[in-house]
Image (tube, grey):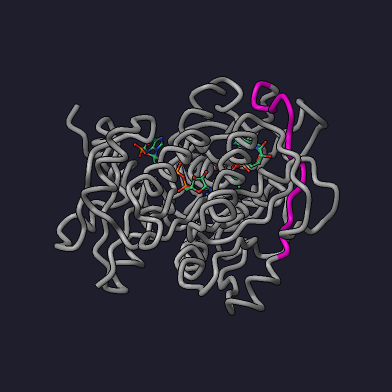
Amino acid sequence: MKSALITGITGQDGSYLAEDLLQRGYTVHGLVRPSSTRSRWRIDHLCSEERLHLHEGDLTDGSRVTRLLAELAPDEVYNLAAQTHVAKSFESPELTAEVNALGVVRLLSAIRTLGLGARTRFYQASTSELFGAVPESPQSEQTPFHPRSPYGASKLHAHWVTVNSREAHGLFACCGILFNHESPRRGEEFVTRKITRGLARASQGLQGAVPLGNLDARRDWGHARDYVRMQWQMLQQEVPEDFVIATGTQHSVREFVSWAGEDLGISLSFEGKGSEEVARVSSVTGESAAHVVPGQVLVRVEPQLFRPTEVGSLCGDASKAKRRLGWRPTVSARQLCTEMVAADLDLALKERFSQASDPV
Ligand code: NAP
Ligand code: F7E
């Protein structure tokens, strides 16, 4: 029976990966931040699993990370923990580098100095944000990197440190260069979930217009469950290598807003330009949107939500993963939106009914 350590197990990917590995018969160890007791909702359903063990620790604490690796000597380490919000990284570049860049240095140094190199395989969560100001489209493993945020720069350091650990010390270390992947478990501060949750709540009269930034940004959105499968596959190769994981199609934030409206039975029309742009209800057909009326503004552009430097367009070429590992995405961005809206509508309905039944 294999064992794996997942850092970031309480996050979106960590929770899906833990499910996947438990189903494969692994013993799964998860690193959880001591302060994260309130953010374990994504793995609550796994906590009665005998083969799941949670260990408190933080990637900024090198001695804790080293002791944990010495104690567990896992077959596989999946480093998913990070400060993952790009906009926040402009406000906290030092913390972002401390966790995202130096955290990886700590893990790799521990594996090496503990003599685990021959046993422990390492996965690093690299990102399409490495490409940033893209010189070509779609982006593949050969596309040069040009990050556009402290987040992207921290992940660039982590990426090359991982590649170097393989080239200099022979570690089995791989980077998955993953494009945006979402799910009903996506954090509420990321744009897809902000849209599906915000519009679902607005459809129930629980909030007003959703404030958004750059509606023109284009992303290659896939489903997180498909992407964690690939993380595992990468560590099962004979030789460690890096792979781009993406769907190969891109859509704008504006399109995602329209889809979420459609899924709620709300037709939206966009009016105005730049920071004056809004999405207004043109018609309502769905019973689920009984609290919305034609003419109502459901999305407004908020200039403060624009980033100092933006990554305007990303689209990945995952042909290497398809060719070599047989990996293919199973969920389109449109289907993903429908799944997320359904889950957020469910939550909004529960919220409305719990408010209605609250004693006055
Ligand atoms: P997420 O939902 O934001 O989860 C991040 C995880 O990291 C959480 O479990 C968080 O713990 C943990 N964490 C943060 N700081 C930590 C620290 N100092 N020490 C230990 N743990 C810490 O992220 P995700 O979407 O699952 O992404 C997983 C990984 O893939 C990340 O490295 C991300 O950068 C990368 N990635 C994501 C995407 C994407 O589209 N989702 C694409 C490419 C790459 P708490 O629960 O305590 O906050
Ligand atoms: O933004 C635009 C925003 O924050 C997507 C992380 O998982 O994927 C994620 O990073 C786009 C950007 O994702 C809002 O400007 C407009 O162009 O959902 P996001 P991200 O920045 O692409 C990569 C691959 C990662 O590695 C990261 O960890 O949408 N946008 N209006 C907005 N974005 C947000 N968050 N909020 C808005 O109101």
Q: Position of residue 213 (x, y in %)?
A: 67, 32
Work out whether residue 96 or residue 163 is closer to the camera in this orientation and state it: 163
Seen in the image, is 340 located left or right of residue 213? left
The quadrant in which the N terminus is found is bottom left
The quadrant in which the C terminus is found is top left
> Height in image: 17 above or below 70?
below
> Height in image: 180 above or below 83?
below
Seen in the image, is 224 located left or right of residue 52? right
Give the residue displayed 52% in from the left and 53% down from the top.
Answer: 182
Give the residue displayed 72% in from the left and 34% down from the top.
Answer: 148
Work out whether residue 48 or residue 66 is closer to the camera in this orientation and state it: 66
Q: Position of residue 54 (x, y in %)?
A: 22, 48
**Was residue 313 drawn as part of the magenta stretch in this picture?**
yes
Seen in the image, is 103 located left or right of residue 249? left
**Was residue 16 drawn as part of the magenta stretch in this picture?**
no
Q: Ligand 2 is located in which of the four quadrants?
A: top right
Main SS category, magenta section: loop
Give the residue displayed 33% in from the left and 67% down from the top.
Answer: 21
Residues rendered magenta in the picture? 304-317
Q: Residue furthest right?
A: 135
> Height in image: 246 above or below 67?
below
Give the residue displayed 62% in from the left and 56% down from the top.
Answer: 221
